[in-house]
Structures are given as C-alpha cells and as structure tokens.
Amino acid sequence: MTKTAHPSRSPATHTGKGGETHQTAGGETPVMTTQQGLAISDDQNTLRVGPGGPALLEDFHFREKIFHFDHERIPERVVHARGYGAHGYFELTDSLADVCRADIFGRVGERTPAFVRFSTVAGNKGSADMVRDVRGFAVKLYTQQGNWDLVGNNIPVFFIQDAIKFPDFVHAAKQAPDRDFPQAQTAHDNFWDFVSLSPEATHMVCWAMSDRAIPRSFRFMEGFGVHTFRLINAEGRSTYVKFHWKPRLGLQSVVWNEALKINGADPDFHRRDLWQAITSGNFPEWDLGVQLFDDEFADGFAFDILDPTKLIPEELVPVRRVGRLVLDRMPDNFFAETEQVAFCTQNIIPGIDFTNDPLLQGRNFSYLDTQTERLGGPNFTHIPINAPKCPFHNFQQDGHMAMHNPRGRANYEPNSWSQPAGGPRESTDGYRSFAQEQSGPKLRQRSESFADHYSQARQFFISQTPVEQAHMRDAFVFELSKVETPAIRARMVSHLLHVDPGLAEGVARGLGLSPLPQPAAAARPVLTGLGPSAALSILKNGPDSFEGRRLGIIVTDGVDATLLAALRKAAEAVGATTELIAPTVAGLHDSAGNELVAQQKINGGPSVLYDAVALLPTVEGANLLRHEATMRDFIADAYAHAKFIAHNDAAELLLAAAGLHPKARDEGVIALEKPKDAAEFIQTCAALRLWARETRAQAV
Ligand code: HDD
C-alpha cells in the first residue's frame, strides 16, 4: 500500500501492515477509514434522499462495510472446531543429539517459539468447554529448520486403526444428519452403534469414559503425540519415539455432575481459565517427555508399535523429560491466530520422521487438504501464524491471496538466474526420508498384529483407583442410558465383559440390562497378565499443592477482615487464586471498613467454578443468604463434589439450610476458628478432593 499524507490522521494507521488499523500511535486515536484508506465522516447513518427517503446505492461506505461483515465467517474445522490457543516457547533441558539431528534437540537452554491450540473434538465452534470429549493438544514449533507440528490429543491412543475409517467415526460422533443433534456429546445411538461395531475402539472408549475426558483445566492435562514416530541422528540411525507432554501442576479432572453444571454456569470455563492464568502471569508449563525404543523392543512387545490404539506403558519404557513448554502470551486476535492456525502432521523437520502407522499416514493427507478448504486456497502458509520464522524460499507462486511471490525472472529450478542460492540443499541439513526397505503385495488388509482389542483396555481399567473405576462405570451408564436402541447397549456391554467383568456387570445393572449378553467374539485371547500402570491414573498423578487452583469465598458486608486476609494470604502463598462471591458485586466493606470488590454475585458464581470453597458470612448476611436457593446449591454441590469447605461460626446457618447439620458432616468441612487455621485449610486443599466422601456416598 502506498503511504499517503493526511494531516488529520496518526501515521501509525498508514503503515500498510495487516492487522494494525486498530492501533494508535503515541496515544492518538486513529481516524476511521474505508479499506481504501478514505477517511470516514459518518459511520452511523446511511446515505439517503432526505431524512425519510430511500437509501442510495451510491453509498459505497455502507456497501463496503456490510459486504465485509457478510464474509466474516470461514468454515469451522470439521473436527476440533472449538479451540483456544496461546503463544509460548519450548526450552531444551536435556540434549537428544545422540539420537536426533533436529536442531531443536541439540542445544540445551535454547528456546524455540511455539503456538499451542487446545480443543474439543465433536462440538461446533460455539459449544461448551466442559463436555465429555477428547481434548486436542496441537503444538506448532517454529524451529530454525522449519515448522514442526505435533498434533496430539490428551489421550495417548485413538478410536480407530486405519485413517479410512475416520469419516465414519466422525460422522457417527457428531450430530445425526437428520436432526442435527445432539451437540458436542457422544451420548447418542450413532456414536455407540459405531464404536460397538468397531471393537478396536474399546480401549479409547474406556479413556473417553474416564475423567480424562472432563479435565479441570487445559493446564492440568497431559498431551500425547499418540503415534510412534522416528528420531534420526546425524549418522542416519533411527530410534522409535512416543511424545508426551506432562503438566507441571499435575493432573486434575472434575466430576461428571460438576461438568454438567459448569457448562451452564460458564460455557467458556477452559478458555477463561487459560486466559486468566496467562494474563495474570501464572504461565502454564509442561515437560516434553520421550519414550525411546528400538526394533528389538518393538519385536518383543506384546502389541504392534504401529497400532495407534495401543500405548507403551511407562513401566516398560520410561519417559525421559527433555524440555519444557511454557505458554506466556495470549494471541492479539483470536481469529488471526487461533482460528487461522493450521496444524499439519506432515510438518516435520530433519531428524524426525514418520512410521507406517496407517492412521498417521492418512492424517498426512487430510490436514493439508482440509486447510486448503478452510482457509480459502493454497496460500494459508503466508498467514503470519502459519509462516515459518526461519528463512524460506521456493518457486511456488500465485493463487488466491498470494503474499510471498518469487522476485525477478527466476520462478523455476534449475535455472541460470538465481543459482547457487535458489536450489535444493544436497548437503546434510536438507530433509531426507528415512530409507526404510519396503516390499510386499498391494492389499487392503488389517495387519494380524493389530487384532488384540481388549488387553490394553483391561490394563487401563485395572490401573485406575476405585474412585476412578466408579466414575468410568457411571459414565458408561450415563451415556448408554441416552442410547434408545437396547441392542446397542447390550452390544457395548458385550465388549466390556472382556475389559472387566465387574465393570460390565456394574454397567448392566445401571442400565437395567439382564441377563448379561454373551461376550463379543474376540480375535485374540485377552492378556490378563498385564499389570497396572500408575501413569494411567489421574488421581495417582495429582499435584501435591493447591498451586494454580481457585478458592471461592462467600462474603457479605462486614466480613471479618482478619480472617479474610489470612485466607487470601495463605492461598496466594501457595500460588492459588481467590474469588469473592457476595450478594452484590459492589458496595461491600470488610469489618475494618476496607472496600471490597466481589468477582461474582451469588447466583453467578456457583461452587462448581472453584476447587475449594470458604463461607465467611456475617450473622446478618447468613440470615439473608440462607433463604437463597443458589446459596444452598453452592454448599450442597461443593459437598456432593467432594470439595473441601471452610466456614466461620456464622456459616452454621447456611450449612444447616443446605442440609449439612453437624452430624452429617465429615473431616472435609473445616471450621476456621482463628486466622492461623487458614494456612492449614489451604494445605488440606492440596488433596483437591475428599474422595472418601464420594466412596461413602456410593456405599449408600
Ligand atoms: Fe485429527 C484436526 C488430533 C486423527 C483429520 N486433529 C485435529 C486437531 C487435533 C487432531 C489436535 C486440531 C488441530 C487444531 O487445533 O487446529 N487427529 C488428532 C489425533 C489423531 C487424529 C491425535 C489420532 C492420533 N485426524 C485424525 C485422522 C484424520 C484426521 C485419522 C483423517 C484421516 N484432524 C483431521 C482434520 C482436522 C483435524 C480433518 C480438522 C481441522 C484440521 O485438521 O485442521 O484434517
């Protein structure tokens, strides 16, 4: 764009750089212009013939504004439509140079810019965050050798073994085509019909029915590259690798009843959580872990390492932590970055290579293809969020919205004009595929080595704590109760009989299904010798502090200033945050006369939004609040969801109103008698939940 002088405008609005028109320079307010740079005198009224006359076609400003608005939407992703991203960096802490020649793994301490997008899979772009679903964990690393995308999930296995089944799987999981519901959930006939007809899905279905599918925060979930990839070192030697992201703050999920309520109270729960953490300087962090193994291990392993419905237990191949991923900046603009970012499994760098996993090979086609459709043409790599941050050069040209085009005469190679700079690199730093020997007949045939569909599902189940196993059983019962066709429910239970008879019987009981169906035909006997793996449980991998968690404090006008200050101080000391919930958000003071601002009015801040709660009303406040239904729900839910509850004397009225008379309470309901009790309470909260309460309730 040409720079034009205009006395009434700030120079910053004339730079011609995309995305800067909303900015001001030196505090000046920029003048609004059309897309052509013409200053606008009136943006509120169309051009008409007299005040009551018809609008004029001549009104180019009106037409340009409406035209652009009409074209604001692009197609949403066919899966993973709802997502939220953030910028950050990867820092290497342990060199992998012995096994990998990738630059990013060579120099300890070096930082590589990263962009991460978390997502749900089934729901549309506007669906709620806390649905039961797999979460996408897609990482773009802008390395000095090109972009490397690790497009993973928060679950280490997948539903299907061959990419050709992906459209069927996704069709079955999303809304039924005739009625266009249900939205963002798998609790319907089509999904359970498909997975119960696809025994290979059983392992992943068990993960999806576990609490992994309702994470408390993106910050508290693991990520997995899922497939086996290859690392290639400087000598060309290949080592197999599985990638893991381990959250520094430990794993945590919510309970299902809580999830249902969070979706109503705050459909943006996960987005808001990430936004609040990053904008307040509490940058989430994950360790990058690698499981490295060779052909000898692969040959001796009970499953095929190319089968994406299987994982490698960490007890067999330990996870080596080699770096950290830190997210420290939110995008300036959601659309420009989070919506337009294009991840692609085929974006790899020298030192990393694919394997013959048939799911991975199919993905390598799908991502580029879908992005051409979604982002409107082949030049989406020119969008800043997708462009590499290292130098790049080729002779690809033209097409819609081409921003980078070859300069000069040479737009082909070899040529006599731009050599030696313009051709491919034959030296060692160019990308070369691992030269694996291949031979065999062309067939459409699933490998025999992919035929065991139940052994690892069983191993996953027995690795869970009793609380987690009960959650899985309840999730199966919930979902299958929404299935209208009895034969589908029974078919699913016929698979669960191979996973664990107790699980199958519990689910059948919950469904009122009797007698039990026959076990499904199994191609291979279940390997009952696979022992539990602690790494597969969330509760065995929780945090040992309340750091990063949120305490909700009920206050009323005149709240005890010393106790409130002690509670907030104790929470902050361990890196937790607090929110005040009150009858009104403003107009409050503590007992010392300090003005307080509450973050939530009582009916907008239910306890499901918090990891633990404290009740600090005054006697007058408690008398008022005990008549409030949302106050009673606040306490009853916190108790039912096994949360720790602290309270002062005046809160006795509220606890009683919620049915929690002294005899009905347990050790998780804690009286704060003096300010020093606050620190002890926060320490107790490190356990996150009093699971014994849930177990007792289940016994009843
Ligand atoms: Fe996929 C998006 C993860 C199998 C086809 N996938 C997508 C995203 C994630 C994953 C995290 C969102 C990326 C973003 O935030 O923009 N997908 C996975 C994992 C898989 C998997 C971990 C199995 C291990 N996917 C898979 C298969 C196919 C696809 C087998 C097709 C054959 N996935 C797509 C897609 C999407 C996508 C249609 C939709 C939007 C996009 O790619 O850019 O191409």
Image: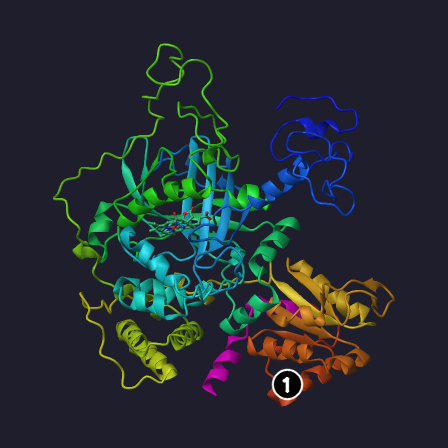
Query: Which residue occupies the foreground of this view, 313 or 138?
Result: 138
Q: Residue at x 49, y 52 (%)?
A: 118
Above or below 527: residue 41: above
Relative placement, left or right, of 414 versus 399 is: left
Location of residue 347 (image quadrant): top left
Instruction: Name the main secondary structure of what is drawn in magenta.
Output: helix
At 47% from the left edge and 25% from the top edge, which residue is drawn?
391
The span shown in magenta is 680-700
**Residue at the extreme top of the image, as rendered:** 416
**Residue 130, x across and y down, in percent:** 52, 63
Residue found 24% across the figure and 50% down from its top: 297
Residue 417 location, x and y as percent? 39, 10
> As displayed, is residue 608 above or below residue 340?
below
Quarter residue 427 falls in = top left
Q: Amino acid at mark 1?
A: Leu
Residue that protrudes farthest toward the right in the picture: 593
Please name whichever residue, 315 or 305, is drawn nearer the observer in this view of the structure. 305
Asked if the beta carbon under badge 1 is closer than 8 A to the nearest atom of ligand 1, the reply is: no
Name the quarter where the N terminus is drawn: top right
> Considering depth in this image, is 493 or 408 the residue closer to the camera?
408
Left or right placement of residue 570 versus residue 358 in this view: right
Numbered disc total: 1
Across and down, in percent, residue 250 comes to 51, 59
Residue 604 horizontal side relative to residue 515, left or right:
right
Among the 4 quarters of the image, the one containing residue 106: top left
Which residue is labeled 1 in the image? 660
Res 299 seen here: yes
Residue 690 magenta-drawn? yes
Q: Is residue 388 visible?
A: no
